[in-house]
Image: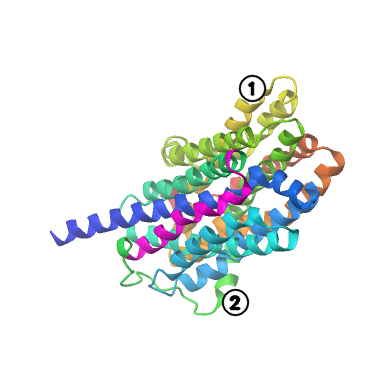
Amino acid sequence: MEIKEKKKTNRKAIGWLSLAHIVNDTYAGFLNPIMPFIADKIGITMAIATVVMSIAHICSSLFQPVFGFFADYIFKRAFIFWGLLLASIFIPIAPTAHNVYLLTLFIIFGSFGGSLFHPQATGFIVRFSKEDFTKNMAIFISAGSIGFSFGPIISALVAEHFGLEMIPYTSIIGIVLAFLMFKFVPKISHIDKKPAHQDLKNTFKLILSNKPILILTLISMMKSLITNSCSIMLPFLWKDMGYSPTYIGVALFLFIFMGSIGSLLSGNLEKLIGAKKVFYLSMIGTLPLMFMFVSTYRTHPTVSLVVFVAMGFLTMLAMPVTMVMAQRLMPEYKSIVSGFINGFSWGVVAVFITLVGFSAQNFGIAKVLFIVSFVPAICSYFVRYLPERIEEI
């Protein structure tokens, strides 16, 4: 009876953590579709707006391994609570900023929320998943992708029908959920396997010396490169073509939502064809789809939208497999490994997105995105050094 009750408690905790992931990442997806309109309001160029968005991704991602290091040593849910709270408050008030400095400040605080939330929440999923590890991780990651997909459509609808100044009222949902976490997500009473090193330097050195972990981080970077480039650049392209905020929000919603479906199906596909083939499909398949998109976005916009959505599905297809493989390779570093795969990779790419933004302003968005899509295909070479299947680890 006690074992049955514990399983029920674990399932409930996973459910609430997944719900929190939905809400946290909903706020993370708020700014992309409305950034062209915020930029117009405060008078900044696309290149400067790209720098601002890059700062957001750096703050929400690059510091995740550091927060993950500390999360692996604590039992409390502090990072989950404060992460969700910061994201809920500061991201929604960012569109009301009257200058680029205030906009950047709000985005930095809100983005740090995601950096706090993700490593500890992912580590908790691992510890509550005594069984069905791959399934629960796929659900958790898909939940975040679903939230990220709804973010653009929610912010776009509010902005178009009520104005940018009404977006801060959406904060109430995240604030309430942050406090509910304390009731429904229990503290971890013990850590199954303590990390071998008790200091940040040695821990980072150990992880960075693990070749498969580095390759998995690279795979995650490639996913981030495509999703961030598209999510940041294409709203400016569509705005220049005369599309409304709602259209842009719906397009991004479909792109990311289909990515969440890809994440959900990832585990089953891995069992069917193996991890390597999932990685190859995700990394190489983006290139022909991007070619089709840039060839049709002006002449056949409906076709280009369908292709864009399919690109979201393929891009996110490998993410749960990437995370599960990394967790199995270094099970004693649950939160910090999550920080590298889900965070550090995004942060590194965010630095390069600034260059992508300036290039797109000078040479054209579509051309630059097509060139960017070559990078994952080239980097797929390193997949050969990974295990064929997760079960082999």
Furthest residue to the left?
Answer: 1
**Residue 206 in picture, x, y percent from top left:** 56, 70
Q: Amino acid at mark 1?
A: Thr
Residue 122 visible? The answer is yes
Amino acid bearing label 2: Lys
Q: Is residue 156 magenta?
A: no
Q: Position of residue 184 (x, y in %)?
A: 31, 60
Q: Residue farthest to the bottom?
A: 198
Q: Earlier in the sequence, mark 1 or mark 2?
A: 2
Helix, strand or loop at mark 2? helix
Q: Nearer the viewer, residue 87 or 130?
A: 87
Residue range of the region highlighted in magenta in the rendering? 161-182
What mark, if any, has residue 172 been given in the picture? none
* Residue 302 circle label: 1
The location of residue 65, given as percent across then percent down, is: 56, 66
Q: Residue at x 82, y 37 (%)?
A: 364
Tell me the quadrant of the picture where the N terminus can be found: bottom left
Viewer-nearest residue: 157 or 237: 157
Callout 1: helix, strand or loop?
helix
Q: Residue at x 70, y 42 (%)?
A: 378
Residue at image mark 2: 201
